[in-house]
Amino acid sequence: MGKKLLVVDGHSLAFRAFFALPAENFATATGQHTNAIYGFMSMFARMLEEEHPTHVAVAFDLARESFRNEIYPDYKGGRESTPPEFKGQVPIIEQILEAMNIQVLTKTNYEADDILATLAYKGEKEGFEVLVASGDRDSFQLITDKVTVLWPGRSTADVKYMNPQAVVDKYQVTPKRYPELAALVGEGADNIPGVPGVGPKTAAQWLNKFDGLDNLLTRADEIGGKRGEALREHTEQVKLNRQINALLTDLELDCEWEDLERGTIDRSRVEELCDTLEFNRLRYRLIALDPQGGQVSAPESKSDPLGEVEITVADSKDQISAFASALLDSPSAVTLCAGSEDSKLATVLALVLSHNNQVLVAAPHLLDEDATNELLDFLNSEQEWVYADYKATAHQIATLGWELPKPSFDVTLAAYLANSDQRDYGLDKLSAKYLKLTLEAPAKASDQPTGQATQDTLFDESALDTKAMIAPEQTETWARQAKAISLLYPILEKHLSEINGLDLLNELELPTAVELFSMEQTGVAVSQPVLKTLKADLKHLVNTAHDNAIAAIGGQEVNLSSPKQLREILFEQLDMPKTKKTKTGAYTTNAAALEELFLKTQHPFLQALLEHRDKIKLLQTVEGLEKAIATDGRIHTTFLQTVAATGRLSSADPNLQNIPARTAEGRKIRSAFVPGKAAEGLLTADYSQIEMRIMAHLCGDQALLEAFQGGEDVHRSMASAVFNVKPEEVDSEQRAKIKAMSYGLVYGLSAYGLSNQLHISVGAAAELMEMYFARFGAVRDFLEGVVAQARKDGYTETIYGRRRYLPELNSTNRQLRTIAERAALNAPIQGSAADIIKRAMLLVAKQLRAEQLSSKLLLQVHDELILEIAPGEKEAVTKLVTEAMSGAALLDVPLEVSVGYGSSWEDAAH
């Protein structure tokens, strides 16, 4: 293959991508917009996939101004300011390119176009086929038989190939003449005026007739009419235009041709960046572009460590016994995972065990009673048991009636502790990141079908041997998964040891996974009649709110869920103050904007609209709960242990941590959660102001410590100090301000954010913050110290050593840096709270077993535990829970626990 050079105008393509993809649809959980990044990398990947260049460079502008501004000060002077959503995306694009080993070029006082022109000119001279990717028409002057411009269209997937004939077809001039045409016509985007009344068609006719711009200007007197007069009046401007749009081809660049050769991709760095940006499919597309054979495809078996296994599909006691006996000769960890395959023929579920290079597949339909007992005895033996995801595996195997041994190691949880901001901890992702391997089995010639199976053969079970119900390629995939776990184990264990994370894994996260499995299996009982009544009531309230909204605008029918129709009503018919515009230019009708608008206008239509939205949301919650009720009459949520970067648990399918508690209708939903048939009540216990107590402990502010130690209303005490009044003279508004301030500071609250929260001016909010810090200086010093230390270390730590890595703290991008600073403020406090409630939950579970009580833990909801109380155990469990939770951490302030009891979750509120 010959040499092929691809040079890319970075800013040009990034801007094209930004405006092609809506910013509001591309943002991470931290608020970083990613539409320009995603679009740019998608276009760039397509170019590499389709063109296979041997050499690549991406050029970026260093600043808006260049030497051209010295020639013409108004050059690009009319451009609008850079959209705030775009800011910060280019540096991230550069980071991804660097991870892909792609040369990024810039040059002070010159534009990216000049770098592209220099490389294209020199590349053609060196015998390269040259591709120039740019959205700037000035690049058309570079086109020759060996230089093609890749011109982006309206979407990121639309790229046009501009060769000499394409330029002639579109502009009726050759590429050499195109900048002369542009000098006559002008370029609005660059603030370059053309000759009045002269468009591309006229300019092309003149250039072709007079053989170029120089001849045209020399013989301008031959052009008659108003256009000729305009040309003569603007001759100097045209000459200036031509000087400005001429691209330089002789820059001194700090690179050689070998520097532009495509190199090996840094997979780990690409994975890390894609995790942060929450890119899933794109990551594999980028990794697959590795020119050194690093594509995400199966390597040959001779060099594939996942392929070096001996697979036994067990159907006898002796095979299981032989596998177990091998551990006596070489004691080490045993890997366990669950394999499943759904097909029209059958659902196959198997337990897959791996030790060294031996893999045992144990499927229940292949085992007789003796073999099954042998397997269960082995699972009860003293071994190190390593899982990819213990909790998920345990649920799968529980469907067989089998119980798995408790985990010694879990690679998912270990990877989460190593990098809590990663978005996907699937085994395939971890294998690609840490092992540089794919789990997909390599294709083999023997795997290909040699004949056409008949319909009868496919679906007649009696025609098949039971062992054949597990396809060979399926067992190989399972084996590769099990082997991958065993290879990940020492890597992640070593990594956690280096960052002092093993104790957190062994003493907190692994026991938490075991307890969560038990809680998920138990589930929580619900009253279906209560849910049915609630649904009917909410439907009535939805309809009432709808009718009130229609009545408020004179009976005009409107779809309250249609943003377009709402904009017409609010901003055209009712002429309300305009809300913030979205990227499409439309005024937003999101909940926050409408609530703010209602505060300004108090219009009954908005009141009814907000009520309608609230009740629909509650109705959807109730309907979701009804669908989630299992055959045992209970809801079995799934607790997510690796989602929140701070260590907090979340809940899904359904989300039971999101049941509202601040409104009457929301609390009614909680009344549907009831004790099971064999229980007598529910008990709830939560911490009072735990995050404030942790902040007091960490910052050591004496006044704050004394307030908590004396059992005072801490918000009232703080308000008393800030506003310099006696505690009994603090009014509700002052207390609310200080409470908002205190909790807000934990989340990096700014004066602007506080002003929105309290509905006061930014100046008043800033003044309040100054008063607060003047009285509680230790709080300010602590918060500043957290960020400074994290910037130095690269991570934050909780009281128990949970780390959150924040490399963006030292970013040159202000937006990324600000987001990281807020995370740094939040992580130690909220993370410590998460650690403490987990410790409390484990202590409660341990004591319930130790005292042989029948009451059960059901849920953890933020800082609250919910238990189902067995008959006669209320007093004992209340004492047990209070002592366990209050003793879960030793802080400089007491942990205060509030306990409630009742016949439903709502009745047990306190």
Image: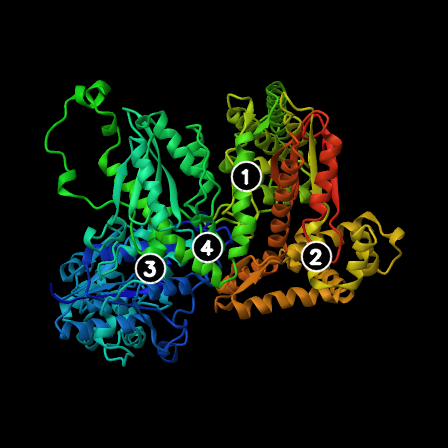
Of the numbered discs 4 and 2, the one sitting upstream in the chain is 4
Separation (CA) of disc 3 from disc 1 = 34 Å
Q: Are marks 2 and 3 in contact (CB under 8 Å)?
A: no
Separation (CA) of disc 4 from disc 3 = 23 Å
Quadrant where the N terminus sits is: bottom left
Q: Residue at x 78, y 65 (%)?
A: 775
- Residue 217 lies left or right of residue 662; in this view the side is left
Q: Is residue 227 visible?
A: no
Separation (CA) of disc 2 from disc 1 = 45 Å
Where does label 4 land, which residue?
33
Foreground mark, 3 or 1, reads: 1
Name the amino acid type tagged 4. Answer: His
Residue 267 disc label = 3
Q: Is residue 287 above or below residue 520?
A: below
SS of the residue under disc 3: helix
Where does label 1 land, which residue?
516
Instruction: Tell which of 584 and 755 is nearer to you.
Output: 755
Of the numbered discs 3 and 1, the one sitting upstream in the chain is 3
Foreground mark, 2 or 3, reads: 3
